[in-house]
Image: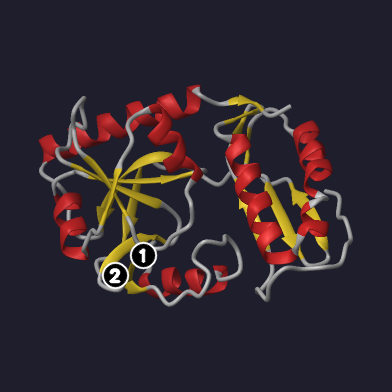
């Protein structure tokens, strides 16, 4: 890990800004998207002087990519940029969320990091990941972007929706739109998401697990629908893994 020091900033924002992603045997999906999102956020939050350090730090991260499952983290504060090498946490095929949504009171949902403590508090209180709702519609979970499909099979021609509420610009969702199908942005209520999850039509996406089925705690889809939904998510996740490019 190497830290860099610099001064300057563009806006008043709680530090830090960070970016994290799965590196599997030296390969990562959508690495350029992660770097671009991180660079844009750091520029907005802390200014061009801090953002100018990113290419050198990313080069060090690339050189540090190795075998196994890693979960490196790019970190920026007003004082500079560094990266941390970390083993990847356990990965799962399903994301379970709490049975009640949480009102999204974040001031900066488009940034990853400044309000992490608040997100962690919501998950700790609920005992699961939580769905964030803003102005009556779903935004995202505390850790993942959301998709809702017309049916649990998600085959060709299936209509796929993603929330249009303010949220982090998901790199995994961008990969999905470019590789699998382009979702329609729409207002999705908690009731609509709950119905979709109960029928195996809800999907969660993030850069550690890739696409997963999304279930609400205490509500399980019928066995046939659950099986079809899991097969669909597994196929998408395998595609996500296979699209990984060497980070070196």
The residue to which callout 1 is attached is: 130
Residue 64 percent coordinates (x, y): 78, 35
Q: Quadrant of residue 35?
A: top right
Q: Quadrant of the C terminus?
A: top right
* Percent coordinates x, y for residue 236 in the rendering: 36, 29
Q: Around disc 2, counting alpha carbons within 10 Å, would you say few (fewer than 14), some (14 to 19), or many (20 or more)?
A: some
- At horizontal 78% and vertical 47% (from top left) the residue drawn is 54
| Label 2 residue SS | loop
Query: At 72% across and 30% down in the image, what residue appears?
Result: 66
Between disc 2 and disc 1, whose residue precedes? 2
97 or 245: which is nearer to us?
245
Residue 143 left/right relative to 79: left
User: How many numbered markers are drawn?
Assistant: 2
Q: Note whether 151 is above or below 101 in the view shown.
A: above
User: Is 140 placed above or below 156 here?
Assistant: below
Q: Secondary structure at mark 1?
A: loop
Residue behind mark 2: 101
Residue 34 falls in which quadrant of the image?
top right
Up the image or down, 2 lies above or below 8; here it is above
Q: Nearer the viewer, residue 187 or 122?
A: 187
Q: Residue 70 at x, y = what percent?
A: 64, 39
Mark 2 touches mark 1? (CB < 8 Å): yes
Q: Is residue 146 left or right of residue 208?
A: left
């Amino acid at each position: 890990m190497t830290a860099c020091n610099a001064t300057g900033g563009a806006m008043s924002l709680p530090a830090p800004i960070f970016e994290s992603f799965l590196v599997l045997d030296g390969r990562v999906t959508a690495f350029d998207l992660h770097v671009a999102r991180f660079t844009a956020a750091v520029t907005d939050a802390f200014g061009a002087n801090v953002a100018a350090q990113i290419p050198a730090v990313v080069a060090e991260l690339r050189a540090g990519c190795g075998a196994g499952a890693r979960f490196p983290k790019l970190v920026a504060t007003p004082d500079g940029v560094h990266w941390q090498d970390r083993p990847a946490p356990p990965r799962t095929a399903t994301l379970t969320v709490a049975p009640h949504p949480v009102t999204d009171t974040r001031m900066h949902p488009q940034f990853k990091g400044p309000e992490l403590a608040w997100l962690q508090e919501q998950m700790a209180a609920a005992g699961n990941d939580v769905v964030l709702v803003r102005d009556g519609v779903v935004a995202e979970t505390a850790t993942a972007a959301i998709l809702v499909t017309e049916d649990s099979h998600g085959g060709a021609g299936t209509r796929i929706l993603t929330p249009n509420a303010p949220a982090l610009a998901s790199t995994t969702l961008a990969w999905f739109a470019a590789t699998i199908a382009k979702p329609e942005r729409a207002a999705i209520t908690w009731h609509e998401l709950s119905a979709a999850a109960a029928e195996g039509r809800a999907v969660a996406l993030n850069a550690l697990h890739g696409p997963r089925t999304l279930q609400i705690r205490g509500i399980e889809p019928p066995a046939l629908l659950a099986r079809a939904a899991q097969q669909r998510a597994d196929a998408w996740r395998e595609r996500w893994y296979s699209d990984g490019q060497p980070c070196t």
